[in-house]
Image: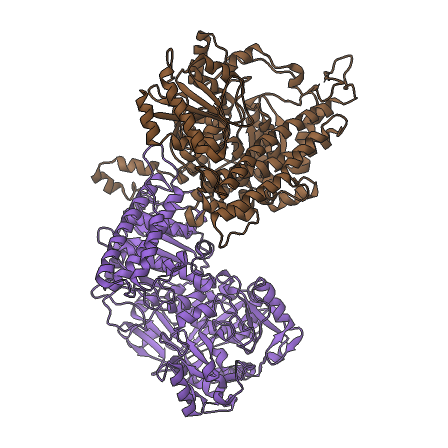
Chain colours: A purple, B brown
Amino acid sequence: MSRYIATSAIRGATNIVRETDLFLQKALQEKGADTKVGFPNTAYYLPTILGLTGRKVETIGDLVPVMEYVKSLTHPQPAQNRWTPYLGETLDSGIATLLAVESLQALRFLYGDQPEKLDGFQLAQASLNDGGGHLNGPIDDIQLRSWGIQLVDGRMPGFAAIVGCAKSNEVAVKIIRELQRRNILIFLAGNVNGRSIIHQLQEEGVEMGYDTYIVPFGTDTLSAIYAIGFATRSALTFGGMKGGQSREILLYNRARVFAFVLALGEVDDLKYAAAAGAISYGFPAIADTVIPEIHPTGVTSYEHVVSMPFNAIEAKDDLERAEKLVQRCIEVRGVKIKMTEVPIPVPYGSAFEGEVVRKADLRFESGGKKSRAFEYLYSLPMEKVEDGKVTVLGPDMDQVAEGGFMDIGIVAEVAGRKMQEDFEPVLERQIHHFVNGASGVQHVGQRDITWIRISKAAYEKGFRLADIGKILHARYHADFGAIVDKIQVTIYSESASVNSMLQVARDAYQRRNTRLGDMADETVEEFYSCTLCQSFAPNHVCVISPERVGVCGAYSWLDCKASFQINPTGPNQPIPKKQQLDGVKGYFTGSNEFVQQASHQQVETVSMYSIMENPMTACGCFECIVMVIPEANGVMVLSREDTSMSPAGMTFSTLAGMAGGGLQTPGVMGVGKYYLTSKKFLSADGGFKRVVWMSSVLKETMAEEFKKAAEYAGDPDLIEKIADEKICTEVPDLVAYLEGKAHPALTMDPMM
Amino acid sequence: MAREAAPELKTIDPAVAEMIKRAEELGYSTVFSRAAKTPPCPIGADGACCQICDMGPCRLVPTKANPEPVGVCGATRSTVAARNMARHIAAGTAAHSDHGRDLALTLLAVSEDEAQGYEIKDPDKLRVVAGYWGVKTEGRTNREIARDVALAALDDFGRQRGEIKGAKRAPQKRIELWKQFDLTPRGIDREVVDTLHRTHMGDDQDAEHILHGSLRTALADGWGGSMLATDFSDILFGTPSPAVTKVNLGVLKDDEVNIVVHGHEPTLSAMIVRVSMEPELIEYAKAKGATGINLCGVCCTSNEVLMRQGIASAGNDLNQEMAILTGAVETMVVDVQCIMQALSDLAGKFHTQFVTTSPKVKITGSTHIEFDEHHALDIARQIVRGAIDNYPNRKGQVQIPNYLHDLVPGFSHEYIRYMQGGALRGSFRPLNDAVMSGRLRGVAGVVGCNNPRVTQDQAHYEIVKEFLKNDVLVVQTGCGALANAKYGLLVGEAALEYAGPGLREVCEAIGIPPVLHMGSCVDNTRILTVLAEMATEGGLGEDISDIPGVGIAPEWMSEKALAIGAYFAGSGAYVLFGVNSPVANSEEVEKIMSEGWEKLVGGKMEFVPDPKEIVRRSLAHIDAKRAALKLPAYDPNKYGKSGDAKMNELLKLPLAQRQAALYGAPVAAE
């Protein structure tokens, strides 16, 4: 700290603690101690309070002891002369501020003040359909988990908590774009004299919401607490930590969550106090105004507080200043950025992956209901590929009327010394991510169900079909340079040639399907490990076999094999199966040994095919939870997207605590959804026929796949015998339903 | 090399200088005049005198005719010098450790509810310390824990086999090294007896072997007796944290009853602090014509109450007679160690009551009120009441030198940990980071006594100022800490005035003075703990011997100082002693303690009279340790850019201009 900051932060903390205490007294009086408080869609109560104190706040009354603890963390301001040390005291005050503010926000929810209302505001979030008019408020658990994999694999290097208001709207947008370009998640809060960066971005038409990776928490400083709640939950969700392990949670964040605070405009006492709290998490603060600086390191990894007065930044204009400001933020936090320069006329970065091109903005589309688009990647001998060549065979989108469509086929031909036929589908699946990264371009689906939409804005900036080829060329070299030496791309847009190439592609899809279908755990010599998540869940390790996809659903056996080729010392290592100890439950000497070592002796043995005995652990970003329902003699499958109650008496968020963090809990397992359709799904416990309940969203989105699984299980009508949340969420109702449908699980051997 | 007599300039402390003048005017002797009159015995000074049997005493002074003199028994210069050194170390260890034993006994009495006025002030620390001793804490009362902890500690004194528990608190590598070389202390008393036995006539007569044994004895002090003394004092009287207080003779008040506590123990002094605030006694003082009761201390009893209760200090060891010379001291109450017999006679020349209290310490002419922890409050009240009764007896002119300075003491290792991260994130990471980056060149412990053979406080002050300029963070204890406090180095502002740019930045970030006062001389173990924490935090090697740091006792005089020096060396530190070499008669012994020990345990002990040479060797050692750790070479110009300065400039502007300047001065476009 500096003495100036210490003084401000301690003063700010003292005031907010007093204010919170008064509000708490008022709430106790008006609403009563037993009135429930909490944030929506989280299993972590008030997450910062849970994490740092271990207290599960459920009612207003539960906040009373929290505030007692908070008061014990406040200290007097340092003296003007003959001061005593203030750093520890300031950091304590920062923690007190975080705990008080979270309490205050919970109470404000109760009074309808959160999430903050903002007229005419619409969150960019496809799944949200509430008419808008409000800001985001806290991030829900589902979103946290779905961002989890991106945070751990480095696609999303960290988050920026921006507090205040930029010097101008132009600067605000530029700062946001610079962060997006680097795929940094952006949280917005605070204001300067009533004006917030949220207002600035709203005026400039920047979409804010989960889909654009820009989350507007609120226009006051208090709402910045949601960033801290997000960080705290990362440690609880992915780090396997328990509430109350304050030191571990803070150190986890310092080591693994690359976040920083960017204070725009004048910094007041409350902002200093909140920043002091963030510093305990290892998150430094950078300001665009003159404030005292703290360069010695230690609580944070690099400088604690950096002042970069905006006008004094050496640059030709404000835009370049904004760019340099962001650059400095990244240096100060030590954020690791993988950046690929993609030579196209629109901004590019995976922050744009979630962008939706709405009908009103549509310039051109291919695929979907009205036309056909497909993509196909295959390998050729080295001499047959001319690296970087992009050909468009047929008309470009200029020749299509605004909002119109046409058929296209994207064919990528790759060559490389280490390239194998097996990698073709792995590489092909990347086209979705790669193309989606362009701002104003939306990509959905794969193979022959591809659907691409281009916005007017992208078109106006000069985006054309050939740019798709340029994206693929740049990204394959950057991400798969170890196996791809050359790539050329042809885009077919003339109807006849699209159709003839489509036939070639479909033959290949069929061949690949058959080959994948033939691949079984028994036919390979080695499985693969995935320890990608150990940056977040230090003791978790996935064992990935041909018939068991990684829990996040993002890594199949082939993906791992390719990844091992690309990076032989990386997170995906071959695990020789060695001796088969038990073919039914799936015990192998090799996998046991590997898991022991890679889990740091936390897990001794792992069964590949059973949920009941030594089930595989999970990090935190699993797609589904499978859990035994003893009364039904079967299992339920709860989807990450399902927020409703389950027959286990818990929601996904609550259950996830038992399934994640690298813990082995018999009867509970986090899995990737495609594992459900595997022949090895719970094969030791009776297989797919054990499924008695399943979130309807899964039934709907994977109907085809489940049909096949049901046929394989020997009961083609199985799916309709499986209940979902629309049918029942209570065990007695479930059992009655199963009996009515004569579900096979009821007559199978007892699970327990 | 025999030493010189007292220096021309006796002190750099103006308050002391004023009192020396007063003593001369009154015709009274002081430690300074006696030092001038009594040159050090040239034979004893160099460790050339052997008095351990009645075949001698033998003086082993080499001459041209006899360049290799031996004693009557044939003992060589090296044997004699080593034996003398070993006995000094054993005596120092005995003194510190016995102080620790008394605290263990007090803790035991508290646990049995037999110690009047005492309580367990820091139950959290009790539980932490219980962990070190393997005492169970869950579901047990503080008293039950305290009892077992005290008994376990007392066991370590009398242990005959095995290892003392405190040794386990060293870094792992150090523990193994001690094991390998048979240096782990077995029992505290046993090691002292071992040294006394092996240095008896006709026993151990190999210098290296004698000194090896004395290293183990010293370690029994550092990681045993002294460390538990600190721990138990914290448990009973509170773990220190920073506060503002004052130092030097100016803290005496001419219109209040002045009571000066002196010596080394907190046990009685803490009770005197307590009763001197009782309204009845204050009223009693007023009834006797005083405006109140003013308690202060000298030497390390002063440090004990300064660290914990913020009681002002009248100064360090050589200030003891000076306090009485003011004529303002009603009672000087002493416990153990560093109490000059001259006080008794001097007190008699004034109205001052000179009260001895320890069952071990009676001084001819003193009023002896024997301390007993079972009646501590009663005894404390008796002493304070006696002082008040004495107030009307002041005779002659009272002359209190008007010199005093603020200081911020209270840096327990617990607080140092806390101040680097707060209640939830306390650690030594920032300190290690600062050393690793080169913001701090290194760390130095500058400790130890005053010695009238050199100018009082001068070496302490010059060495520390030089370190600060060179971005070396300084920790101090004992009389060294009080010395530099008198000259203003122990306040936050000193960082802005004296520290190099990197050190200044670190001090400003945490809010610390550039010199941290860590306690009395027994609390040097706090420095051991800090070093152990730094070694285990990571980035500065794995052992204390890897850390870019030094330990210095520039004005040492007591046997305890030698024990401290030896336990730091045995723990891996480079220790430099000023004044003179008590083993100068044997180059071999000097070499064993320097190169020999460095090879053995990574630490060494050298005697270097010149303060400038001490600084030179220290910085060279720090730089060498930095290089060995592959840290960047120290560069004084690299850091120092952060802090409050720019903000303060902004705040000086009128409000309107301030708004405009908020975003900084524009830079012309390229």
**Residue A620, image x and y in percent?**
46, 67
Q: Quadrant of residue B540?
A: top right
Residue at horizontal 49 percent and vertical 29 percent from the top: B371
| Left or right relative to A476: residue A195 | left
Q: Nearer the viewer, residue A468 or B654?
A: B654
**Residue A739, image x and y in percent?**
43, 90
**Residue B51, image x and y in percent?**
70, 20
Using the image, determine if residue A244 lies above or below residue B528: below
Using the image, determine if residue B309 lies above or below residue A285: above
**Residue A15, image x and y in percent?**
27, 48
Using the image, determine if residue B603 lies above or below residue A729: above
Quarter placement of the N terminus of chain B:
top right
Quarter placement of the C terminus of chain B:
top left
Residue at horizontal 36 percent and vertical 35 percent from the top: A83
Residue at horizontal 40 percent and vertical 15 percent from the top: B327
Using the image, determine if residue B325 lies above or below residue B165: above
> Is residue A281 something one can see in this rendering?
yes
> Is residue B548 something one can see in this rendering?
no
| Left or right relative to B217: residue A365 | left
